[in-house]
Every structure is written in structure tokens, then in C-alpha cells.
Amino acid sequence: MPLLREAAGPATIIRREDYTPPPFWIDRIELTFDLDPAKTRVLNKMVLRRNTEVPAQPLRLDGEELNLARVMLNGGGCSFKMDGDALVMESLPDGPEPFELEIFTTCSPEKNTQLSGLYLSQGDFFTQCEAEGFRRITYFLDRPDVMASYTVTLRADKDKYPVLLSNGNLVEQGELPDNRHFAKWSDPHRKPSYLFALVAGRLVAREQRIVTRAGKEHLLQVYVRPGDMDKTEHAMNSLVSSVIWDEARFGLALDLERFMIVATSDFNMGAMENKGLNIFNTKYVLANSATATDTDFANIESVVAHEYFHNWTGNRITCRDWFQLSLKEGLTVFRDQEFSMDLCADASARAVKRIEDVRVLRTMQFAEDAGPMAHPVRPDQYVEINNFYTVTVYEKGAEVVRMMQTLVGRDGFRKGMDLYFQRHDGQAVTCDDFAQAIADANPDSELARQPDAFKRWYSQSGTPRVTARGTYNAEERRYTLTLDQSCPATPGQAEKLPFVIPVAVGLVDAGGQDLALRLSGETHAVAGSRLLVLSEASQRFVFEDIDAEPVPSVLRGFSAPVIVDNGLSDAQLLHLLAHDSDAFNRWEAGQQLALRRAVAAIRAEGPVAAQPLDHAVVEAMRAVLRHPTLDAALKELVLTLPSETYIAEQLDEVDPQRIHAVREAMREQLAQALQADWVWAFEQHKDNGAYRPDPVSSGRRALAGLALTMLCLDARQTGDTVWPGKAYQRFKDAGNMTDRFNALSALVVSGQPLAQEALARFHTMFRHEALVIDKWFALQAGAPDRGGNILPSVRQLMNHPDFSLKNPNRARSVIFSFCSANPAGFHRADAAGYVFWSERVLELDAINPQVAARLARAMDRWKKLAEPYRSAAREAVARVAAKSDLSADVREVITRALAE
Ligand code: BES
Ligand code: ZN
């Protein structure tokens, strides 16, 4: 049933500066659930007391879509009133003594299509409470700074719901009349309501016991539906690695006897860190070599780790308010990135992981920072907090933590983390508290010298620009590097103060070696990279004893989330691409060379050049591909051109069709010019033995996959049928999903006639594997547009019997793959893509506002579009805005998109 919503009143803006501590504390809560899909009964007994540190106020309990049956105060009647959704009690006992409230409500899980609060997934019960879903389960002070001890009793039918789970430890279970049973759970740790969870259903678990350093035994469980047990090994291995890593790197041990992960196929996000009972989207749990790709395996490893790491960074120390979201998310993303890097066997694999992370940051977060939804890592205001689970809070937030580590060193960062836990364990704190702990533990660091300037990374939005210019003085044997910084205006922030920017730099000599570096005033030269800290608008760094003009390699390892203008010539970039000891900047040099060619061809008048790349770049790419020692994963990254989205961000005016045409022309050129090299690469990397998702073999599969795509692309030009035939054969014979899907994708992406046959066969093979069918949908909706063919096929896919708008994974696989990941398919001169978008936003908004609001963001950058796209896009956005009963979620995104 669609949501019935009031026509829009004025949006309520929540402001960070308005924060006040809660007027009441809730010390304990005892919840009893009678689980029933149509009508679940919830008895909530809680012990509250006034917070005497703030002026006496009425108690306002949050609630949403609840049916209230009874309220009792200290076992007797009491007066209360409703104010909108809130339950308000004005005449509560004065003074600090605890009192007891008993609130009885019901709710309807089967009607909950928003997947926030208590809902059903394939007949089983799940909860999702972050950020404000607990209020959809019972009346409560639903804010993260109110931490309570939870006892939870679940009662349900024994056959339909044999497994009953909640946070903490199972303390009692037994039979009830009418074929029902119960389980009672007690969480030994106080927690905010957003970490509450329950699960009930027919589930099975893979179990493993582990012993931590202190000699304590813990039970780890991964719960899935009965048919999915054969896809749980990798998630369990990832969990075990995570437990071990957090103890080894940060001294943080598991604080629970039992740690559970449960998978559900209906989930708005990736996964959720509920205390002791993490709930996951099946996409980030289920994997075996037949159904999941290398990317899936890597994602599972990092998402399992991420949620586990929240147990300390998020759960033990939580956020004071939702403006501090990056306190837990930025820090925990940083931790999961470090974990994945530490699992890598060598420096090259670490660099590959770093490049992948930076690629996400630069395409997604830089675009967000330049658009209407730009906000600081610690936002100042929101209408709907769900709209602020963003790449800025997450990925840029992680970069801010990474810069702290860079400034204080790895050991210093560990000391800072220790101090953070010493000071704040069990508390709800702010981003400033975190930065201060890292600074205080490292009094001699650059971070401690200017903590307030550094904290601007939390308060100022926008991506800083850094200009680097070098001059060489042969007589004085000096090289002077001048670094300038600036930051463009963003919504609500016209002027910015300088940031503290760690810039890792190397100087590469003519032979490709790093020079030893000595800054003026220093006594010793240091080999390799060194860290410059830019904290003023402009600073000069003078290097001594330089015998010949070097090529500067600036921002090695992407040491800060900034846009660099390095002023390098093509020749200098080619030098770095051939020699830089820093794998990140080596990759970056190749990206910049390709980007320059792309931008030139896009800006040129007339039809798109057939061969936008010049000889030097093609030969440099060939040299990388044939390089005797570089590993396959890095080669695959270098040989992959910057995405259309990233190219678009470099332009003032965006013509998505022209960008697509130029990038495709470049791809075809590389396919043709390097044909023999692609054959070599494919033959050399196609066989990898028994499947293992490690960096080396997954890198080899990635390069073989790229080679096959290039060979099919070239075959399309020449009319060759041998390589498409080989791709089809590989698709049929593949021993794992990565090779199979790459072969299928090579056929689809190159528009080969065999693609249709392969797609049909793939669907038949995997029709019972929902996650694989998601890939099947996504591949088709995201395929390169040829003459406007994608939108009609997307509309057809939506009529496929396997399609459902209610399942977020399925909706994303078709609609998001088209609207957000296929610019050339989406941005049509006839505006049909935008019409499709507006229809889907409205349709989804009636089912699931959170998912709808994410889709709404596909139009964030409409103002950058060239005509006729711009006018048509504005019209589509305005059409959505004209709807009177939009959710607050979608309303906020659309209002910002239209703002001047
Ligand atoms: N706490 C979030 C999940 C969440 C986000 C719940 C927003 C409710 C609203 C969780 O820790 C998280 O960050 N999950 C990410 C994956 C992670 C690896 C970055 C997600 O779900 O996308
Ligand atoms: Zn998280």
C-alpha cells in the first residue's frame, strides 16, 4: 500500500548549533515482542530519570506509525498527550529519582515497505534502526546520546520463526502455549537506540569459535536462509580476520561472548553494525566462486570488517548527535581501508587498493562537493539525516582521518586512538573530541601545532585546489617548489580559510630514480618521498643539492583529498608514468595524459576525432601493458581510461553524448593499436588455477577480462568473429563467476551479436540466484548506449517477471545502473531519460523514501549540462518538485537541486 502523506508543510531544518543535552536519561529498557506480520505487539518498560543538568522540561518521546494502546507511570495511570508524532508527558515527578514508564503499542511489519523499523523480508522479521528507525518500533528518546541497557524478549510461532535473535547474550528460552516459543536476550553494554536489532525467522548458521589474546572464547555466527549455507565461508573468514586485525593493530578485542551476522535480501543499505547482531544485505555476505566475482569477494571482506570495527568506533564510543556521523563512519571507513591494505601481501597490492579507493572519492565525492548537496564532513544542518550518509561523510571523512595518521605517523596514530578510548569509552562524543585526542597524544606533531586549522576539514565544504610549480636554479643547485591552495565557494560558504594539507612529494631524476631530499636549513638528506605540510595560502619549499632539473611527483599516495594542478608537461607526465616509484602517481600520470586528450577532443569543434590519443600516449600504454615487472592489477588500472563521470567533472559545460563518443573512440583506438598486445595479455593471464580471491589472481583475472573486452571491441571494427567466439566459449566454460561475467560483459559491452544468446543462457543458468540476476539486470542497464538503445531495453527489463521495485537491490540493478551509472544512455537529447527518472523517483517515493532520495540525486549536476539537456533536466526536476506529497527525503534533495 502506498504511503499516505500530508501535503508538504514547511520543512523542519535541524541545526547543529541547536544541540542541547537530553532532558531525561533512559537507564534501562525491557522490551517484549509478540511477533506477528500484520500486528506485532510491543511492550516497552523503561526506567527514566531527569537530567538535572538542564532546565526541567516535558518528556517528548519520538514515535512514528505506531498504534498506542496504553501508557502507565510507576504502575498506575498517567496523563499524556500527542503532539504530532511525539508522545508528550508534562506532569512527571520532579527531582532526580528514577521512574518507570510502561508503553504498549502495536505496529504492522508487513506494511512496512520503507525497510526502516521492524519489517519483513521473505517472511522473516528484521529491524533497521539507524538513524531514526527505533521510533517506528516503540516510543523512545530516539537520539544517539541516550544510552540504555536493553533486555529483549521475543515471542513467536515456533515453526515459522524457529530462530529468535537480538543483541547481546541469550539468557533464557522456552516453550509457550499455541505452538509458540520465546527467547530472552540481554545486552551487557549500554547502547543508543539506533544499535537495537532483532531477527526472527527460519535461518541456519555457520559457526566458528575463536580465542582472543586474553584467552577468552567467542562464538561467531553467520545466519542465512537454508539454501545459502554454501556461500558463507568467505564472510566467516573475513570476520575472523577482522577480529584478529583489530586486536593486533589497535589493541581492540571483541567484547561479547557471541557475535552474529545475519543476511537479508531486503535492505536499504549495505550493512548495519547493531551491537553483537550485525544485519547485512545478502550482497555483502553471500559468495562462492560460482556466483560471486572478485569484486564481490573484496567488498564482502571490507563490509564485514567495517561493521565489525564499528563495535569499537561507533558502538563503544558513539556520536553525540547525527551531525557527528563521520566520527564513526569516516573513522570506520579509514579502518576498513587499512584492514584491506594490511591483508595485501605487497606494496603493489596496497597501492592498487589505494587507487581504487581514491577513484571512488574523486568521481563521487568531488562531484558531491561541487554540486547542490555539498556539505562539510560534519554537516551544519539537515532536513532528513538519511540524506547525509554521503560520500563526503564517509569517504572524505576517512581521508581526514588518514591525513591525521599521515601527520602524526602510524605509531602516533595508534597512541592517539589509545587516548581516544581512554577518554571516551562509553560516551557519545564529537568529531572535535576525536581530532583532539589524536593531537593531544602527539604533542610534537604538525597536527598538535595547529589543531584548529586542521579541524577546518570538518567544518568547510568544497574540494581544495592545490597548485604546484617548480623552478630549478642550476647555479645554486636548488629546486624550489611553490604550493598554493584555494577552495571554491559552496552552498552557504562563500569564503574559506586555509586547510592544513599534507603533501607527500618526491623528485624524480632523469634516470627515473628518486632523489634524496634535503630542505634548506636541514642537515641530512632523506631518501625517497617526504611530507610537506601546506597550511598557508602559499608556501615555498626549497630543496638543496639538486644537480639537474627533476620531475616533481606531488601528492604521492594521494596524501590529501584535493585537486592538484601540477603544471607538468606531457613529457614530464610520460616520465612519471614510466618511472615513478610511487605506484599511485604512476597511475595518476597515465590518467592525466588520457584526460588531457579526452578534454581536448571534447572541446574541439566538429565531429569527434577517430583517434584522440597521440602516438606517445599509445606507446606509453603499450609499455605499461608489456612491462616485465609491474603486476597485472596495476596494469589493468592504468589501461582503464578515466570514467565518463570523472571526465565530466573536469569540464565547465557537459555534453554527455560527446564525452561518451570521445571516450569510446579512445577505447577503440587502444583496442586497435594494441591488438597484438591484448592478445598477449589475454593469453598470459587467462589461466589462474583453482579459484582464490587473492589480489594477485584477481588482478590477473581483471587484466584478462579487460583484454577480452578490448579484443571484442576491436573485432567489432574489423568484423572479426574469432574473438567474440572465444569470448562466448570462455563464457560457457568459465570455472568461476569472475571469468564468466567478464566474458559475458565483453560481449555485451562490444555490442556483439552473440551477446543476446549469452545473456539468455546466463539467465537460465542463474535464475534461482537473486544476486546473480541483479548482475544480469545491471549489465544490461549499464551497457554502452548505441543510438539510444538502452532506455527501451531498460523499460523492457522493468517488465521482466524477475523485476521488482520493492526490492532495493533489484531496483538499483536496473534503475540506478541506468540513471546514475550510464550517462550516455541516460542523458538523451529527447529528454526521455529524464522523464523515466522522474517517474521512477515518484513511484519509489511512495514505497521507500530513502531509496527514492538516492535516486533523486542522479540529477545533482543538471546545471552543468549543455543544452538541450539542461533545460529538459530542469523541467524534470521541477516536475518532481511540483508533487505536493513528496517525502521529506526526496523534498530535501530536489529543493537543493533547484536552489540558486
Ligand atoms: N551504519 C551504516 C549503515 C547505515 C547507514 C544504516 C545509513 C542506516 C542508515 C554502516 O556501518 C555502513 O556504513 N554501511 C555501509 C557500508 C560500509 C562498508 C561503508 C553501507 O551500508 O553502504
Ligand atoms: Zn559504517
Image (cartoon, rainbow, N blue to C red):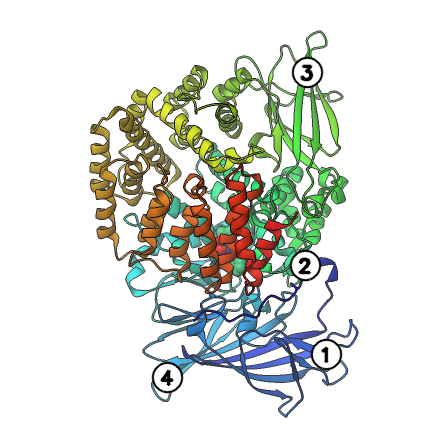
CA separation in Å, label 3 and label 4: 80 Å
Q: Quadrant of residue 239?
A: bottom left
Q: Disc 3 vs disc 4: which is toward the camera?
A: 3
Q: Judge: label 4 CB < 8 Å from ligand 1.
A: no
What residue appears at the point 49 percent right and 61 percent down from the top-left corner? Answer: 845
Lateral position of residue 748 relative to residue 166, left or right: left
Verify CB contact (< 8 Å) between mark 4 and mark 2. Answer: no
Give the residue pinned by disc 2: 429
Mark 2 or mark 3: whose residue is earlier in sequence: 2
Extreme residue in the top direction? 475
Observer able to see residue 243: no
Residue type at the position of mark 2: Val
What residue appears at the point 59 percent right and 73 percent down from the top-left corner? Answer: 149
- Considering the numbered disc 2 on the image, is that residue within a helix, a strand or a loop? strand
Mark 3 or mark 4: whose residue is earlier in sequence: 4
Give the residue pinned by disc 4: 180
Residue type at the position of mark 3: Thr
Label 3: few (<14), some (14–19) or many (≥20) C-alpha neighbours in 10 Å: few
- Considering the numbered disc 4 on the image, is that residue within a helix, a strand or a loop? strand
- Whether 644 is drawn above or below 886: the answer is above
Q: Judge: label 1 CB < 8 Å from ligand 1.
A: no
Mark 4 or mark 2: whose residue is earlier in sequence: 4
- Whether 236 is drawn above or below 157: the answer is above
Residue type at the position of mark 1: Pro
CA separation in Å, label 4 and label 2: 42 Å
Q: Disc 2 vs disc 3: which is toward the camera?
A: 3
